[in-house]
Amino acid sequence: MERTMETIWSNCLSIIKDNVNPQSFKTWFEPIKPVRLRENVLTIQVPSQFFYEWLEEHYVNLLHKTVKRELGSEGRLEYSIVMDNQGNEKSPYTINVPGSQARNKNPDLAVAVNIGASIKNPFIIPGLKKINVDSQLNQRYTFDNYVEGDCNRLARSAGMAVAAKPGGTSFNPLMIYGNVGLGKSHLVQAIGNQIKSNFPNKTVLYVTAEKFTQQFIDSLKNNSANDFVNFYQLMDVLILDDVHNLANKEKTQDVFFHIFNHLHQTGKQLILTSDRAPKDIKGMEERLLSRFKWGLSTDLQMPDFETRVAILEMKMYADGIDLPREVVEFIAHNISSSIRELEGALTSLLAYTTLSKKMPDLDLAKMVMRNFVKNVSLEISIESIQSLVCEFFDLNVDLLKAKTRKREVVQARQISMYFAKKLTKNSLKTIGEYFGGRDHSTVIHSCQTVEDLMETDRRFKGYVEEIQKKIKISTV
């Protein structure tokens, strides 16, 4: 039976597969293609120069032993490397490079893949001398000023674990995703700052995906792509912010793929952020998306009312200011789109207070919020809802918090809970606390009961609609 390059390489793969872990085999050997067999020399094609360098560094002995087993003691290996085109040609081209044994006899053949002794730092501005890598982290972002709540507890806990043992947990990569303004950048930079504090000798780097892309483009222009790759491979912790911005940038994704593999396989920590879950990122190579899922992907949600109040209070404390509790709660009630907007509203109020030299009371807060925030629902609180519902049914508000099961009280309580859930941003747990410490399941049951009765009881529906009108009038 004639031995072809395909059968020989297939036999080689069978041996290699028994000697490496499944993920390494899939990453580093499945993409290889046999392209030529002449006498005792097998030529295999690899997808990039970095790929070739990785094989030579980590698997050279395994490859040579396997090839010699198939081709005999005179068997040799040659690489055909697919090179990124940087000239005017319309497609990539390949170069052939002997394996390490032959290359040692004729060093000139390896010129195309040699790495210069000096690696350029893409963060250094020309004309400035800088040896150490600046982390690019904002020192103000720490765990101490990152308020914990139900909305971020898992992400924060994972971040603390990574900071205590970077590269040594199952959270690698750690991917944090969520809408704009929810604190993703704050959290990942807090992780980076904590790692620098815990491990001063580790090299930590924070970079946005846009900056990473621009640096890569510059490296292609300057024929320094190797320096770019090798610089990033030196990192102990790489934090890439807004990774979704790599979408539809094929070459940038390719170079990040190789950097990712190198760092991950050498036990270095990767931390990523995105505005959406990995499965929802469009225009990203599947091989990258699959790697994003290797560790932990966790989302950040909009904080509940209590956490928003805590965020405002922490900012006030940091700025050395004090506002009436009712003003703080008013802002927290009416800003629910993002933490960034929440803090912006507070800053706007403080700026107006300083310029107008007026006391920051509730009336001033209402006026400022009308100017700076769209579609504000003014002063809709659980207390005001309870008051209006009890006024409508001529009941004492305290009865809503009591354990009585009188029909008229139960009905008023259920309607109050219904509007509290519908018109405020409070959590189910918080709503229940306003009604005598009832649990969230009671709130859910009450809301469902009101919705069901509105569909079947015309008189009850009229009550609910009339109360809703009164609530809207009271908040104009």
Image (tube, rainbow, N blue to C red):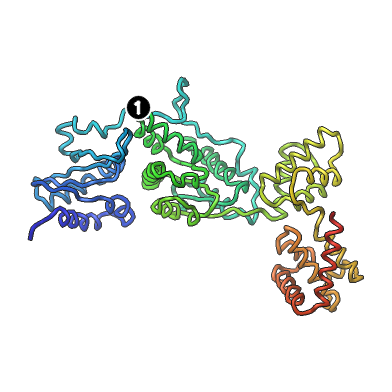
Q: Nearer the viewer, residue 16 or 80?
A: 80
Residue matched to label 1 = 118
Label 1 SS: loop
Residue 231, position in %: x, y? 40, 34
Q: Is residue 382 visible?
A: yes
Q: Nearer the viewer, residue 385 or 195?
A: 385
**What residue sits 75% from the left and 66% below the top?**
432
Work out which quarter of the rendered image holds the C terminus and state it.
bottom right
Categorize mark 1 by other alpha carbons within 10 Å: few (<14), some (14-19), many (20+).
few
Q: Residue furthest right?
A: 394
Q: Residue furthest top?
A: 127
**What residue sits 43% from the left and 44% below the top?**
249
Image height of 349 relative to 31, above or below: above
Q: Nearer the viewer, residue 449 or 205?
A: 449
Image height of 63 relative to 354, above or below: below
The residue type indicated by label 1 comes to Ser
Residue 422 shown left or right of residue 472 in the figure: left
Instruction: Choose top left, top right, bottom left or bottom right for residue 170.
Output: bottom left
Q: Nearer the viewer, residue 26 or 463?
A: 463
Residue 352, position in %: x, y? 80, 36
Residue 465, position in %: x, y? 82, 68
Q: Is residue 266 visible?
A: no
Image height of 449 relative to 20, above or below: below
**What residue sits 83% from the left and 44% below the top?**
367
Image height of 431 relative to 147, above or below: below
Residue 62, position in %: x, y? 21, 49
**What residue sits 62% from the left and 54% below the top?**
301
